[in-house]
Image: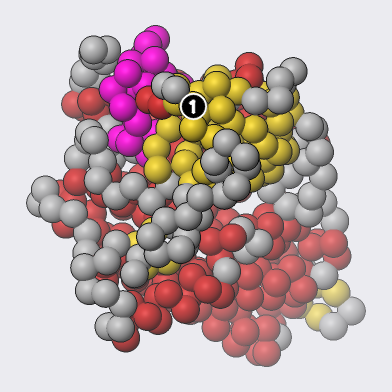
Amino acid sequence: MFATPAAAADDLSPAAFHARLDGILPLIESRAAEAEAQGHLTDDVVAAMRAAGLYTMLYPRVVGGAELLPIDAMRLAERIAYAHGSAAWCMMGSNMEGTTMSIYIDQEGVDTVFAKGPDITISGNGVPRGYARPVEGGWMIKGNWSYGSGIHHAEWVHSGCFVTDQDGNMQFGEAGQPKIIVCHHPRETIRLLGNWDVLGLRATGSYDYVLDGMDELFLPACMAYDFDISAPLRGGPQGALGLAGFSALAHTSWAIGVGRRALDELKKVIVARVDAFGKSSDSASFRFQYAQAEARYRAATAFAHEAWQDISDTNARGETHSQDQLTLVKLALRHIHDVVSETGTFAYRQARGAGLRDTVLQRSWRDIHAGTQHVLMADQMVEECGRGLLGIAPPDAPWTVFGIAG
């Protein structure tokens, strides 16, 4: 069995992470424009974040990660998102995909992935856009996947596949849902299609990808897990969050940071601006609207922090979350995106020409409206939150990625 030497406890503390982040935030900010232009993060930014342990901060300690509590990881991600939304998006995506891989795949798979240590990056799309048919010892997979955020710098790929029989017929579970597995394969097995031409999150390099030079790829059974798996094989109690919880953590943290930046950039524009109508900050109407935007943003952020602090406190006691707790973080996820969409648009319109030009304010607005397009923001997710809040969902049923089971 592969064992990773334990890092010094002080190096894995939230304070140590923030100290290291202090040193690289100027680099992240300074390289943002170059990354936006080329369509993916710059090599030096990725290297700096990896060296700081940020790409593995949620990984379980048994594989060499820091296994930070969710609220501590959230605070770090918010700071990166404030500097550059795409940098935080890629970093948190790799954490989500790497953490779930670390806790769910069999030990043989863990030994393979972490053979050279914990410093790995993983990207791809776990939402099923591929197909997997069972064969002796594993699966044969194929597909055309989209939105591989951060995949330019990945060493491992995370790909969702519908399970089929040998004739290609999709297989279904007892509740009628399609059977899905999440597969993990080396970066050299895929080819990027280079088609990331989008409104926002331009530097995430979220390219489509296909298998390279083959129709199907053999995947050992130890390199896949069931999409709706609930019981982690290793790690602490936060592992029970699974894809449903870690994805909510990643996207919520990102939205908080980018939303804060949009309002702060507007403030810089307004306080300095004098135009044909006078000094912009003298407008009573604007001051009223800005105060309201601040209140909405701060209230949504406080809700998200409260929900994640509650889960983190539960995990710190060695306990796993309840259905009610995950319902609230799922609701906070959609709510913060609704709010930053509204307040970001307010900032963009009030900035006028400063929003129209290629500025940080415009980038924040574009990123926000890319983030709101993610499948996790679908109205059906809020409907599921309503089911949980009303108490009409099975009380002990777990959250899956797209809703409460049962």
Q: Residue furthest front?
A: 167
Could you tell me if residue 33 is visible in this image? no
Name the colouring of the figure: secondary structure
Determine whether, in the image, residue 104 is placed left or right of residue 135: left
- The x, y position of residue 12, in whole percent, is 26, 30
Determine whether, in the image, residue 70 is placed left or right of residue 294: left
Residue at screen point 22% across, 64% down: 322
- The x, y position of residue 69, in whole percent, is 26, 46
Residue at screen point 47% across, 75% down: 382
Residue at screen point 24% across, 28% down: 61
Main SS, magenta region, reads helix
Question: Magenta stretch?
Answer: 98-120
Residue under numbered circle 1: 135
Q: For label 1, count other residues whose C-alpha is less than 10 Å away and answer few (under 14), some (14-19) or many (20+).
A: some
- Residue 42 versus residue 250 in the image, above or below: above
The disc labelled 1 sits on which kind of residue? Val
- The x, y position of residue 260, in whole percent, is 54, 61
Between 337 and 28, the one nearer to me in the picture: 337
Between 290 and 258, the one nearer to me in the picture: 258
Give the secondary structure at mark 1. strand
- Residue 182 versus residue 153 in the image, above or below: below
Residue 107 figure quarter: top left
